[in-house]
C-alpha cells in the first residue's frame, strides 16, 4: 500500500518543484494527449506503481502551470502546501462527510470552519452554511433557499409541489454577473428567461436607480444578485443601498463573492464590502483566493430555516446525533468529500492576519502588473484593479486592436513565462490580469513584465499588417 503512495508523493513533489521553471502553458496538444492516454479498456490489471508512473508520463505537457506564481488567467489560485497536505489526508481518511455519524471529526471541523468563515467575512453569527464543490453549487444552494422562502411567503410549498403552477420567480442582476448564476437558474427550474438585466454603470456596478425601477415593476417573488468582486474589474456593488431597496420590495439578496468576499479579511480592502452583511445569502470559493485545492466552495444563508428546509431529509438509517450539525441537511450532495479539513488547515496555518496579508500582497502585485504592462509602448490600461483583477489591451499600428490583443495574449502564452487570458469587455478585446496565488512574488512580476515587453516589442515591429483569421479566445 505505502509503496505506491510514496511514489505518488515523489511525483507530486517533482511537479511542484518544477512549477518555477516549467512553461506555464501546456506544451502537448489535445491530439497528443488523446494518443497517449486513449488506451483500449484493459482486460487485465497491472501493478499500481506502474499505473502511477505511466499516468505521470502520459500527462506530461498536458498539465497547465496554473499553480505557478506567474499564472494570471481566469481566477484560479494555487494551493497552499498545508492545504494540499490536509487534502491528501482527506483522501486517505476517505470519510463520507454526509453526516456526523459517518464522519464525526469532519462534521466538527466543518462546524468550526463555518463559524470561522462567518467571523472572517463579518457575516451574521446566526447564518447557516455549507461546504460545497465550488461557487456554482454555492449559488445553487443559496438560490434554492431563496426559492423556498419567497414561494412559502406566497403560500406555495416548492419542495412538495415543484415549480409548475407556482408564482413566477425573477432574478435581477447586471450583465456582469458570472455565467454560473444563469446555470443555477437553469438547474433550479427557474429558467434563464426569469433573469432581468439591470443597468450597470461604466465601472460595472449595478445602477441603484435602475434597480429601484426594476424592483417596483412587479410583485413577483424576486432575487437580486449582487457582485462582490466583478470577474473583470473586481468592482463591488453598493451593498448597503441595494439591500435597502431590495428588502423594501421583499426581495432576497444574494451575493456572488467567489473571490471578492475575501477582501473582508484585509484591513485595507474591507471597506469595499460595506453593508454586505445585510444580504440574505453569500457564495464564495476556498479554491480561489484562499488557495485550497479544488472542490471547495462555501455558501451562507441568513435564514437558516429556509436553507435547511430546502435540503434536510430524514431517513431511518441516518439518525442524526442530537445537537450536532449534519452536513447533508445543508448540502445538495449526499456522499461527499471531507471539505472541511483543507480549509481548517489553511486557516490554522495562516491565521486571519496571514490571510489578510496574502490578499493584500495579491492586490499589490495586480496593481503593479497592470501599471507596468500599461506603461509599455503599445499597451493601454483599460481597467486598473480595484482589488486583484485588472484589464489591459494592446494597440496595433493598423488600428485592429482587438485582433492584436488576442495575438499578443497567445504570443505571451507561447513565451511560457506567464499566462493570461482574453475576454471581451465594453466592446473590446482585452487581456485580463488576475492575481490570486499565494506564491506570486516581486520576481514573478519582474519576469512577467519583461516577457510581455519583449513579446510586444517584437510584435509591434514585425506585424503592422492585418491579423485577420486569428483565433478568438473565449471567456
Ligand atoms: C469562479 C467564479 C464563479 C464560479 O465558481 P466555481 O468555483 O468555478 O464554481 C462564480 N462567480 C465568480 C465571480 C467567479 O469568479
Image (spheres, rainbow, N blue to C red):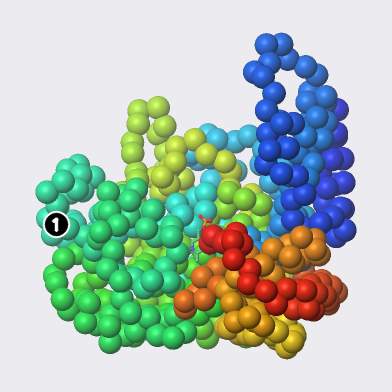
Q: Quadrant of the N terminus?
A: top right
Q: Residue at x 27, y 76 (%)?
A: 246
Image coords of residue 435 (percent x, y): 67, 71
- Packing grade of label 1 (10 A; few <14, some 14-19, many >=20) is some
Image coords of residue 302 (percent x, y): 36, 65
Q: Secondary structure at mark 1?
A: loop
The answer to which of 97 and 39 lies nearer the viewer is 39
Asked if residue 162 can be seen in this view, the reply is yes
The answer to which of 127 and 449 lies nearer the viewer is 449
Say above or below: 31 vs 81: above
Residue 67 horizontal side relative to residue 311, left or right: right
The residue positioned farthest toward the top in the image shown: 44
Image quarter for residue 250?
bottom left
Residue 56 horizontal side relative to residue 378, left or right: right
Image quarter for residue 155?
bottom left
What residue sits right under mark 1 in the picture? Answer: 167
Amino acid at each position: 500500500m505505502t509503496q505506491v503512495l510514496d511514489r505518488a508523493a515523489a511525483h507530486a513533489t517533482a511537479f511542484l518543484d518544477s512549477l518555477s521553471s516549467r512553461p506555464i502553458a501546456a506544451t502537448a496538444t489535445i491530439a497528443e494527449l488523446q494518443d497517449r492516454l486513449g488506451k483500449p479498456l484493459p482486460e487485465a490489471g497491472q501493478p499500481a506503481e506502474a499505473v502511477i508512473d505511466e499516468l505521470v508520463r502520459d500527462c506530461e505537457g498536458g498539465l497547465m502551470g496554473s499553480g505557478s506564481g506567474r499564472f494570471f488567467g481566469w481566477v484560479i489560485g494555487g494551493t497552499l502546501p498545508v492545504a494540499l497536505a490536509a487534502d491528501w489526508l482527506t483522501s486517505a481518511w476517505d470519510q463520507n462527510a454526509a453526516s456526523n455519524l459517518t464522519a464525526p471529526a469532519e462534521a466538527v471541523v466543518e462546524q468550526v470552519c463555518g463559524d470561522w468563515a462567518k467571523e472572517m467575512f463579518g457575516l451574521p453569527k446566526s447564518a447557516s452554511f455549507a461546504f460545497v464543490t465550488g461557487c456554482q453549487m454555492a449559488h445553487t444552494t443559496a438560490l434554492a433557499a431563496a426559492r423556498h422562502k419567497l414561494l412559502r411567503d406566497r403560500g406555495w410549498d416548492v419542495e412538495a409541489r415543484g415549480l409548475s403552477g407556482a408564482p413566477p420567480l425573477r432574478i435581477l442582476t447586471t450583465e456582469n454577473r458570472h455565467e454560473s448564476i444563469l446555470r443555477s437558474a437553469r438547474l433550479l427550474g427557474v429558467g434563464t428567461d426569469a433573469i432581468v438585466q439591470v443597468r450597470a454603470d461604466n465601472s460595472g456596478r449595478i445602477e441603484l436607480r435602475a434597480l429601484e425601477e426594476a424592483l417596483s415593476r412587479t410583485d413577483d417573488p424576486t432575487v437580486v444578485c449582487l457582485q462582490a468582486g466583478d470577474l473583470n474589474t473586481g468592482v463591488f456593488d453598493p451593498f448597503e443601498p441595494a439591500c435597502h431597496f431590495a428588502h423594501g420590495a421583499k426581495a432576497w439578496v444574494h451575493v456572488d463573492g467567489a473571490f471578492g468576499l475575501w477582501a473582508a479579511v484585509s484591513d485595507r480592502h474591507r471597506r469595499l464590502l460595506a453593508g454586505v452583511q445585510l444580504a440574505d445569502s453569500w457564495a464564495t470559493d476556498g479554491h480561489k483566493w484562499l488557495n485550497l485545492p479544488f472542490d471547495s466552495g462555501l455558501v451562507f444563508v441568513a435564514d437558516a430555516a429556509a436553507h435547511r428546509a430546502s435540503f434536510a431529509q430524514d431517513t431511518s438509517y441516518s439518525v442524526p446525533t442530537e445537537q450536532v450539525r449534519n452536513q447533508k441537511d445543508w448540502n445538495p450532495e449526499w456522499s461527499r468529500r471531507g471539505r472541511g479539513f483543507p480549509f481548517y488547515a489553511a486557516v490554522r496555518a495562516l491565521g486571519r492576519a496571514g490571510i489578510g496579508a496574502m490578499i493584500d500582497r495579491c492586490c499589490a502585485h495586480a496593481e503593479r502588473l497592470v501599471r507596468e504592462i500599461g506603461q509599455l509602448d503599445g499597451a493601454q490600461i483599460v481597467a486598473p484593479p480595484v482589488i486583484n483583477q485588472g484589464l489591459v489591451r494592446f494597440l496595433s499600428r493598423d488600428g485592429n486592436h482587438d485582433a492584436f490583443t488576442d495575438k499578443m495574449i497567445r504570443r505571451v502564452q507561447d513565451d511560457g513565462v506567464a499566462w493570461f487570458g482574453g475576454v471581451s469587455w465594453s466592446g473590446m478585446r482585452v487581456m485580463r490580469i488576475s492575481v490570486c496565488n499565494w506564491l506570486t512574488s516581486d520576481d514573478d512580476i519582474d519576469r512577467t513584465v519583461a516577457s510581455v515587453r519583449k513579446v510586444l516589442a517584437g510584435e509591434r515591429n514585425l506585424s503592422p499588417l492585418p491579423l485577420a483569421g486569428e483565433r478568438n479566445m473565449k471567456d
